[in-house]
Image (cartoon, grey):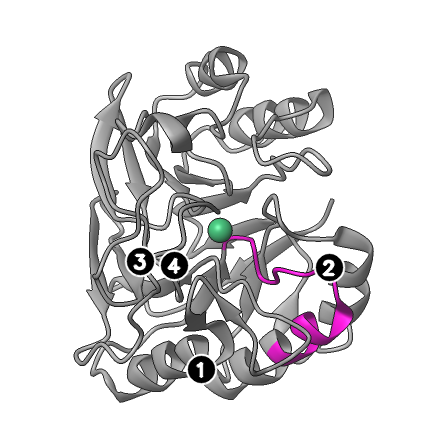
Amino acid sequence: MRTTFLHHSDKLPVRFIQVTDPHLFADKKAELLGINTFDSFKAVLSEIQQTPFTFEFVLATGDLTQDNNPEGYRYFSEEISQLQKPVFWIPGNHDYQPHMVETLNRYPEFISPLKHIIVNNNWQILMLDSQVLNVPHGYLNQYQLDWLIAKIEQYPDLYTLVVLHHHIAPTRSAWLDQHNLRNTSEFLSCLQQHCHIKAIISGHIHQEMDTLWNNYRILTTPSTCIQFKSDSYHFNLDILPPGWREFELYPDGSLITQVKRLKHNLFVPDFNISGY
Ligand SMILES: [Fe+2]
């Protein structure tokens, strides 16, 4: 699998953003639990463009569509291309990769299929596919684990971010934690061969986390549509606005990151719906 090399000023931090779980439908008017996912995705992109945070590229971390339809991928591509930055993506449990690959590859000017990104020859980003077809939980197959080990062995001096859709650390929400990455111990044993893992970045749980798991920094990010309530044993939605995450990578290996959310929340879910 090929590598993307990005070079920017090595005096300044390299900045990027993560957008995740837009859950777009073929019908732009369709709602997920009372929220129009196309409108909320557009609102997030619009606010990203209005913030003073300048960034070099975008990571889109899965569940780009909700209904297995190529149209959702087309809407995603058309809207995200307006940022005019390179976009790198991985699949989530809701994605249908035949449609996803075919549609996203029609936008090569901005959307890249590559999963290995080297930034300024001091950071690398490894984008993993944790999808198991037709089930909500995740699993890293042997190809993914072998590829992960190969990259961290090939570039032992690079500060490393590992990116996958499914969450690793428990959320303390039982209904959600049953849908986690299942083979975390195998994943962990791969990581332990490398001392420069700076963070593991996920989507999937539609909520913000910045915590430690086995001494690795775990970062998760709000969805661009519905938000799941944290620390909730049963399924529960949150009133928090849709959001995204900003990252700054420094040449000395330090990482600064923060979640941003829409300033005015026009996207309130239907709290009467009891399942997802
Ligand atoms: Fe999702």
- Tally of numbered tags: 4
Which residue is rendered at x = 54% and y = 68% of the image? 87
Residue 172 locus on image (x, y percent): 26, 27
Q: Amino acid at mark 3?
A: Phe
Q: Between disc 4 and disc 3, whose residue precedes?
A: 4
The span shown in magenta is 61-75
How far, Cα to Cα, is label 1 from label 4? 13 Å
Q: Which residue is mark 2?
A: 68
Residue most extreme to the front: 272
Classify 10 Å Cα crowding around label 3: few (below 14), some (14-19), many (20 and above): few
**Of tags 1 and 3, which is closer to the observer?**
3
Quarter of the image where one finds residue 78: bottom right
**Of tags 4 and 3, which is closer to the observer?**
3
Residue 144 locus on image (x, y percent): 66, 29
Q: Between disc 3 and disc 2, whose residue precedes?
A: 2
Up-down relation of residue 9 to residue 232 (above or below): below
